[in-house]
Amino acid sequence: MRRYKRTLVAAALATAMAGGTVGWASGSAQRAVTGPPVGSAAWRADGSLGRALPDPATASPAQVSRFFASLTSRQRKKLLREHPLVVGNLDGVPVALRYEANSLAVRAAHDPRYDRLAGPGRQILAFDPRGRGQAAEVYGDLAAARHVSVVVPGSDIDAANFDRTHDPYGTPAGMAASLRAATGGRTAVVAWTGYTTPLGAGPDAAGGELAEAGAARLARFTQGLAAAGARKPVLFCHSYGSVVCGLAAHEVNASDIVVLGSPGMRAADVADLRTDARVWAAKDRSDWISKVPNVELMGLGHGQDPTARDFGARRVPAEEARGHTGYFAPGSDSLRAFAAIAQGEIR
């Protein structure tokens, strides 16, 4: 009977969303940005080094890393100047070189939405101007840090607003800064807005297409961190970002996957994720995500609640968090737990 009722709820949800009659924001359909970085065709055609450059569409991050290790400093700088969008976004390229390349790429974009990303001291690890724009920023010393975390955001986040100052703990940049502060600066944290997120809470947010595209990009990104010599990260996946992490779980290079305010991970339980990473889940009582049916039908909905006992995730306390974006608020029990997980203090 319970399963039958859940199916009816899912069917009603699917019908309502298709008809645009739910009380959520309908959102605008998004086309996922996929494929190799902008400028890859010119990169492939560049024979100035007397050897083929690694194909951004087929070369693994490890192969890219080995290629750049074989170059002289002058050769690296040449590629950086001539192909900043490729060098800045090709997983496996040395981190410092990516920062420099993306600073050039942001300035060359001449787009006021992104001007601030080229500001002094900013460590932009990825910048893709296509679509609504994607970006990743590092807080701390990624190469030297003993612990690394990556924040994966949910809906309505892109390169123009991932670091907005209002609602700071609802943005990947605000979450990253708060987590780093909570660890006393002992953890490097990446605010990763590396996929096309849904707008609003309409069919895109209820579907898995954008999450599937994001999962492939997240898996490659974590493999790129490993190739660049960074420590295996902890993933903190908020809202729709937890769907991305669920679909990527079997491929990502991560020690832990922490989901918060999750509508589901497109998995029946932890075993269904097929990952060796430890899986954690947090949800506070005031989070509106609890009103989203934990079902999956006809491609809509994201399945079981990760905080449910039978899902099998380790539960993160969140009694002091408030709402959908309060999990990283300073002083909260959830942030204290996140900091402990990020530093490997909880086994």
Image (cartoon, helix red, strand yellow):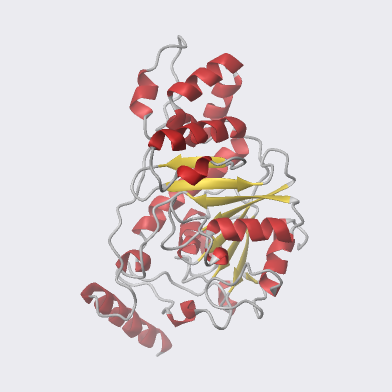
In this picture, residue 116 sits left or right of residue 112: right
Count the numbered circles shown: 0
Q: Is residue 6 above or below residue 228?
A: below
The one nearer the camera, 229 or 144, is: 144
Q: Quadrant of the N terminus?
A: bottom left
The one nearer the camera, 275 or 220, is: 220
* Residue 60 visible in this rendered orientation of the protein: no
The one nearer the camera, 298 or 141, is: 141
The one nearer the camera, 217 or 48, is: 48
In this picture, residue 119 sits left or right of residue 347: left
**Residue 342's x, y, as percent?**
70, 57
Residue for point 38% across, 83% down: 6
**Residue 95's x, y, as percent?**
60, 34
Residue for point 46% across, 58% down: 244
Residue for point 76% across, 63% down: 346
Extreme top residue here?
A: 50
State the image quarter where residue 235 is shown. Answer: bottom right
**Residue 254's x, y, as percent?**
61, 51
Extreme bottom residue here?
A: 1
State the image quarter where residue 100 is shown. Answer: top right
Residue for point 28% across, 60% down: 29
Q: Quadrant of the C terminus?
A: bottom right
In this picture, residue 268 sits left or right of residue 23: right
**Residue 343's x, y, as percent?**
74, 56
Q: Is residue 182 above or below residue 68?
A: below
